[in-house]
Image: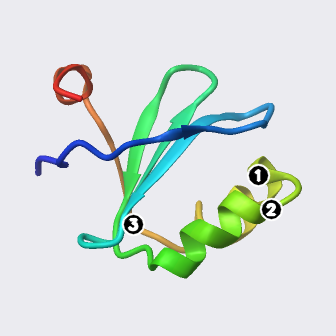
Amino acid sequence: MSTPTIARVTVQSSSLASIGHSAEDNVLVIEFRNGSLYRYLDVPADAYEELLRAESKGAHFNRFVRTRFVHQRITTREAENR
């Protein structure tokens, strides 16, 4: 599965580096501080907006995103096409 380029915004977090969302595809893309890049599927826009507004983005991600949505690690080759 190929993810179209989704613009990400840098966030203040000890675990997350950047996040982005495609409202058209309901795909959330998260880059972690360790360099890993993941896509989360079927994520509604309001879930993305809640993550952006969260005081602790890492804690919010762990509680409301990590186990709620199907995810896939984006390979290096896919990431290079961003």
For label 1, the crowd category at 10 Å Cα-Cα, with few meaning under 14, some 14 to 19 and many 20 or more, is: some
Marks 1/2: CA distance?
5 Å
Frontmost residue, 62 versus 17: 17
Residue at x 76% of width, y 48% of height: 58
1 and 2 marks in contact (CB < 8 Å): yes
User: Which residue carries the number 3 mark?
Assistant: 70
Q: Secondary structure at mark 2?
A: loop
Mark 2 and mark 3 lie on one chain; the one further toward the N terminus is: 2
Residue 43 image position (x, y, % from top left): 43, 73
Mark 1 and mark 3 lie on one chain; the one further toward the N terminus is: 1
Query: Tag on residue 57?
Result: 1
User: Which residue carries the number 2 mark?
Assistant: 54
Residue 16 in the figure: left or right of residue 12 = left
Residue at x 47% of width, y 28% of height: 36
Q: Is residue 75 above or below residue 69?
A: above
Q: Is residue 1 above or below residue 68?
A: above
Residue 24 image position (x, y, % from top left): 25, 72
Residue type indicated by callout 2: Ala
Residue 72 in the figure: left or right of residue 63 = left
Q: Secondary structure at mark 3?
A: loop
Residue 73 image position (x, y, % from top left): 35, 40
Q: Quadrant of residue 49?
A: bottom right
Residue type indicated by callout 3: Val
**Is the C terminus in the top left, top right, bottom left or bottom right quadrant?**
top left
Marks 1/3: CA distance?
19 Å
Residue 81 in the figure: left or right of residue 28 = left
Residue at x 17% of width, y 48% of height: 4
